[in-house]
Amino acid sequence: MKIHATDEDVYILAIESSCDETAAAVVKNGRQVLSNVISSQIDLHTLYGGVVPEIASRKHIEKINPVIETALKDAEMTLNDITAVAVTYGPGLVGALLVGVAEAKAIAYAAKKPLVGVHHIEGHISANFIEHPDLEPPFVCLVVSGGHTHLVVVKDYGEFEILGRTRDDAAGEAFDKVARAVGLGYPGGPKIDKTAREGNKKAIHFPRAKVDGSPYDFSFSGLKSAVLNYINHAQMTSEEIAVPDLAASFQYAVVDVLVSHTVQAAKELGYPNVAMAGGVASNSELRAEMKKACKKAGLQFYYPSPIFCTDNAAMIGAAAYYEYINGARSGWDLNAVPYLKLGER
Ligand code: KG4
Ligand code: ZN
């Protein structure tokens, strides 16, 4: 993809509502975040042990206008100063996505601004550009969130080759399920991360699944079953479970596979730069182990701050900038696409 540089600054008003975060941001020239407002619904969904789609949509409707107003105010801008309006249109929960898409269309139409639909995962990957001005494609990126686990080559801005993906559960999903099984609650990732700090990661050996013939694919359902079996067995024999040891050992099993696949891909394919994205990318063990392994392999490792790992709109603004300057424009018929594939339009 050719980048058509322009002398004029590009200000993107970005909107994200694909899951349980209502978010808006203003991003200048793809890498400078002028505002980043996130209204999380986590407390509400915690009551039910997971995201309830109907509640998510209703909350988005309630929050989206104030969140956008705050994003513009924090950036000291009005809609007149904005170059284009960007929005996540997939993948995600259809009712949740629709709120953002309808809002973005209405604003863009009323303000006579171009509209740019953005892929949620392209957003997560682009979060790496915000704090790393030196990072440019190509690079290998591990995308690990609640719904996705992908190993991707970012060949150019907006151009991706998927090397591997999970065959069953996403990494974040595995964290959430194991956390629930040991009574740590929702969302599981941060709770396991915290509890694991007090445990021994070598206390229990859990399996590292390999997918035959697909060295870059992942599978976490076997690991999840092994953890559940371990818990059942302990309960049946009235043994006490050391939750910190279990959390640390499970986390280490996930991290081990994520790190080894990523580093192997970068080395085998000859990419010197490695990045990481998505909610699970804020996991402290994953960050530490990836840093160590990349250093050992002579690879440069990039990762976003936690605030840009979880769902946010700044990452959508970063992705939208590169789409926008390459001429991508969405029509007024832009619709939510819950199962949108990466690289598809
Ligand atoms: O990217 P994200 O905010 O939303 C999706 O697009 O899915 O990711 C949410 C996922 C959840 O499964 C959550 O448990 C996990 O990211 N997560 C973590 C951590 N923080 C969030 N997993 C492991 N360790 C963490 N520190
Ligand atoms: Zn996400």
Image (cartoon, helix red, strand yellow):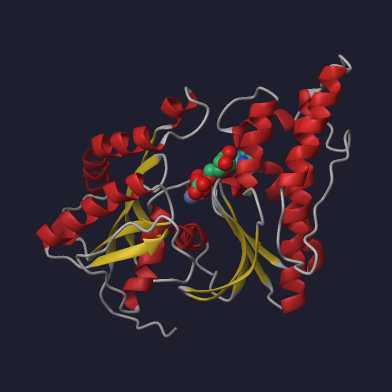
Measured as percent of width and height from the top left, residue 101 is found at: 27, 54
| Residue 199 in view of the camera | no
Judging depth in this view, the residue of 79 and 331 nearest the camera is 331
Q: Is residue 73 left or right of residue 134?
A: left
Q: Position of residue 170 (x, y in %)?
A: 62, 49
Relative placement, left or right, of 68 versus 190 is: left
The quadrant of the image that shows the C terminus is bottom left
The quarter of the image that holds ligand 1 is: top right
Q: Identify which residue is drawn at 56% across, 29% down.
A: 186
Residue at image position (32%, 64%) is 117
Task: Name the residue nearer the viewer: 264 or 133.
Answer: 264
Q: Is residue 60 left or right of residue 40?
A: left
Quadrant where the image shows the N terminus: bottom left
Expressed as whole percent of the image width and height from the top left, the position of residue 202 reads 88, 38
Question: Farthest residue toward the top?
Answer: 238
Residue 264 visible in the shown view: yes
Left-right relation of 96 to 157: left
Given residues 20 and 30, the one toward you in this image is 20
Residue in view at x 89 percent, y 17 percent: 237
User: Where is residue 158, by image quadrant?
Assistant: bottom left
Determine the residue positioned at 80% across, 25% down.
232
